[in-house]
Amino acid sequence: MATSLYFIAFTLLNISSIYTKTHALNILVVGGSGRVGGSTVRWLETLSSRRTTPANKSSAATLSLTVGGRKRESFDAAIRNKVIPSSGVDFLSLDIDGDESILKQTLQRWQQRASESNCLVVHTAGPFQGRRSPVLLATCIDLGIPYVDVCDEWDLAELSKENLHSVATEKNVPAIISCGIWPGVSALMAARGVNVLTSRHKDLEISSIDYSFFTAGTGNAGPTIVSATFLLLATPAITFLSGKRYDKEPWTESKIIDFGKGVGDKPVWLLDNPDVPTTALYLNRPTNNNDELPKNNRWKMDVSSRFGTDPLIWNYLFGAMKSLPKSLLYNRNAMQNFSLFSEPIIRLVDKLVGATNAMRVDVTAKDVNNGKKKTITLRMAHDDLEQCVGLATAAFALEVAKSMDRDGAYDREETGVTVSPGVWFPVELGRDARENILEIVKEGAFVYELDS
């Protein structure tokens, strides 16, 4: 009971701190008619509603939510199916894969209509595999709009970071990419594990970080997660060995992983995940956000990521899919259409196996003096992937919202600001941002072991 009261109080204080300094917040969720985007919309509404307390009722700001997408019909269907609220959410017609000048004009009109509000864009319109340019991020930075996305494609994320970080810094725009539950919260778990080990023991050097994930069925996230998995089967799994990158064949090198109470042992296979390169390349680099980790030299770590699902036969189906031509597997439209065609079967399987999402991160460090190793294992599990990925994405978005002043720009002097201007990976965030987000995603978790 005490823990529950603490969580509610923490969330109210955290969310209210976002709004008491702003006039209003206008959030555009691109892809908000989909399962992940719709969950994000619902959680943004839920979390923001908790800001209204007797102490801040008169000063609490309003939240305006807009769903962006190509088809009004999809938006209307999302309302009918209760994917998004039936009232209080507007629709904006836009195509992020279409003409870039039209996209910019559309966002400008939306921004102008919200002239008295702070604007923030959340990009959930996956799958991201196959996209070659971070058009929406670039447009948002150009217009001075803070941004968050759930990109799980490393090449696209890397391009975003390399090409747009300095631009975002110059234009005073904060952005976090590749966030959500995984990638995203999983990277925060790794950073938490590193901090626990290095703060408890001196002269430690992080030697390995192993990510493991399990989702029952599609986790209620629907065909998109299936099509994304098919696309990933055509993508080499990035791993690091002693700090050097090695691309391996996906869906190989299986392991049995204990995900904790209520989930148990599950088989997992190598699968590409941006958490791997972001952790290996950025975890202990100096940033404006993070001043707690050692920055003398980048650790030469082993890093890998694995994934498995239920029912067990689906894992073997994914393995068999690898024999298809990569040109077919990496065809976004073909894989999405195949997943939509299979939707009745997907929904039936989801009903049979549930929607559990479980994550485990193992962080191992070596004593530089005697070579002895110490390992910390962090676990988190929710009973519904769709719910927890929306919760996590909303948490990242609201953390960015803290960094805006009344004009929507990054406020360097404002207390509580945790995200500096620039394009950041979750693993680069500092302790305060990390702990704020981890505390929010604790909601609904039936496994939450982050301090063992």
Image (cartoon, rainbow, N blue to C red):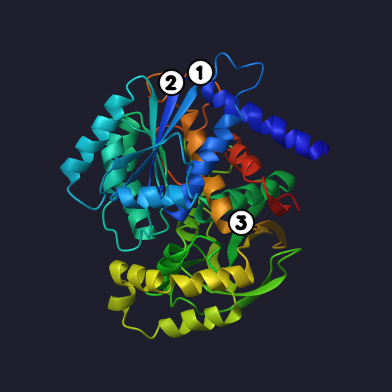
**Disc on res. 405:** 2
**Disc on res. 206:** 3
Residue visible at 34% across and 75% down? Answer: 329
Between tags 2 and 3, which lies in front?
2
**Disc on res. 96:** none
Q: Which residue is mark 1?
A: 21
Distance (Cα) linking label 2 and label 3: 38 Å
Q: In the figure, 170 relative to 137: above or below?
A: above
Distance (Cα) linking label 2 and label 1: 7 Å
- Mark 2 surroundings within 10 Å by alpha-carbon count, few (fewer than 14), some (14 through 19), many (20 or more): many
- Nearer to us in this view, 246 or 389: 389
Residue visible at 56% across and 62% down? Answer: 219
Q: Quadrant of residue 327?
A: bottom left
Q: Position of residue 299 (x, y in %)?
A: 54, 55
| Numbered disc total | 3
Q: In the figure, 217 relative to 3: above or below?
A: below
Viewer can see residue 426 = no
Residue visible at 54% across and 72% down? Answer: 348
Viewer can see residue 144 = yes
Horizontal arrangement in the rendering, residue 41 relative to residue 358 (left or right): left
Q: In the figure, 291 relative to 346: above or below?
A: above
The amino acid at mark 1 is Lys
- N-terminal of the two: label 2 or label 1? 1
The amino acid at mark 2 is Asp
Distance (Cα) linking label 1 and label 3: 39 Å
